[in-house]
Image (cartoon, rainbow, N blue to C red):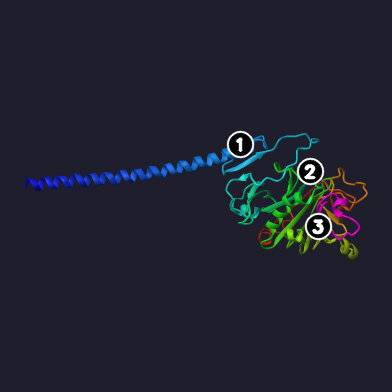
Amino acid sequence: MVMSQLVFILMFHALTFLQISAEEECETFEVILKLKEEIRKLNNKLLIGEWKVMHLRNYRRFKLVPNLELSLEPKKTSENITEPETTLPSIGGSLLIHDKDCSELYDRLKPASGFYRIKPKASLEPFLVYCDMEDGGGWTEIQKRINGKVDFDRKWEDYKNGFGHFQSSKDEFWLGNDHIHALLSDGENVMKIELMDWKGKRSYAIYDNFRVSDEKDKYRLHYGMYSGQAGDALSGGANMVEQWSASHNGMQFSTQDQDHDRYLQGNCAVENKGGWWYNRCHAANLNGRFYRGGEYKAKYDNGVVWSTWRGLWYSLRHTTMKVRPSVYMDNIGSGGGPTE
């Protein structure tokens, strides 16, 4: 009888011990999960801190906003002071890359216009772009001229990789032919070209099925139908003779050190002070020399030109080239935006 009681007592204590051990194990598991979450948060903070330190030399201040965007506040400079020119950075913007272009980002978050990192191809590193979230939203800008502070008379490698200032919405840049090709290589895309003269008048041109080939084909330009108010300068205008010699459709890209135009007597990029899809030579030259005031005099018509709107001898004040998928445009509207 005593032996039976002893066995019962031992079994009771054993079961109690096992129950306590299970509860302790469960608590230990929860503690481990909490520690892992804390470690993850600390790693994120460390990543952000390392990013800040690494780019402290390039940017004066950093501002962390709720969705892990890093907002870069530009250095204030005098209107007459030219900042050092830089290659477009592949870092900045969101630390987590979800979107292949600005239209996907707009559909996902509806954020304000600004700089964001995108990844058009799984095989490519993410890169920084300016997303225009106005005018229907979802536009990825590939070119901007606004103040003449960036020299667009550059060599092939610069146009391939991209160049300019990339901190403020008022900065000038060329996104880079490799990046432009990556953006436009899947599906059909629309290009919108926005123009402004020195009196503040605005106009625009839209081209469907806009695409640029890869470097092996010298970034050859192709596009479809035109619509808009500024005239079809990319096709050389309405005159058939001018179209034969000035249409940019099907032309390869040329720079001062790589001549792929159809002008046998010289290099259009050298004469017209910028890389572009020259023919013999152009009816549009948005990467030309920045002349202040509009009308200019020079040996060649090498200004920032859209001939079907202000002519060959008028250099525009502001230009922007931006793209987004055609299907997105069909859902939103024409994208014409304001003209004044």
Is 95 on the left or on the right of 129, as rendered?
left
Secondary structure beneath dot 1 equals helix
Q: Position of residue 101 (x, y in %)?
A: 65, 54
Mark 2 or mark 3: whose residue is earlier in sequence: 2
Q: Nearer the viewer, residue 200 or 184?
A: 184
Mark 1 and mark 3: span between their CA atoms?
40 Å
* Predominant secondary structure, magenta span: loop
Q: In this orientation, does residue 289 appear? A: yes
* Image-based side of 79 in relation to 70, left or right: right
Q: Residues within 10 Å of mark 3 (few under 14, many from 20)?
A: many
Magenta part of the chain:
253-276
| Residue type (three-letter) at the residue carrying disc 1 | Val
Q: Amino acid at mark 3?
A: Trp
Q: Quadrant of residue 246?
A: bottom right
Q: Residue at x 89, y 55 (%)?
A: 266
Label disc, if present, on residue 150 of the rendered structure: 2
In terms of secondary structure, where does tag 3 sit? loop
Q: Is residue 268 magenta?
A: yes
Query: Mark 2 to mark 1: distance in Å?
Result: 27 Å
Q: Amino acid at mark 2?
A: Val
Circle 3 is placed at which residue position?
Answer: 277
What numbered label is drawn on residue 53? 1
Where is residue 63 drawn, in percent x and y?
61, 37
Give the mark nearest the N terminus, 1 or 3. 1
Q: Which quadrant holds residue 169?
A: top right
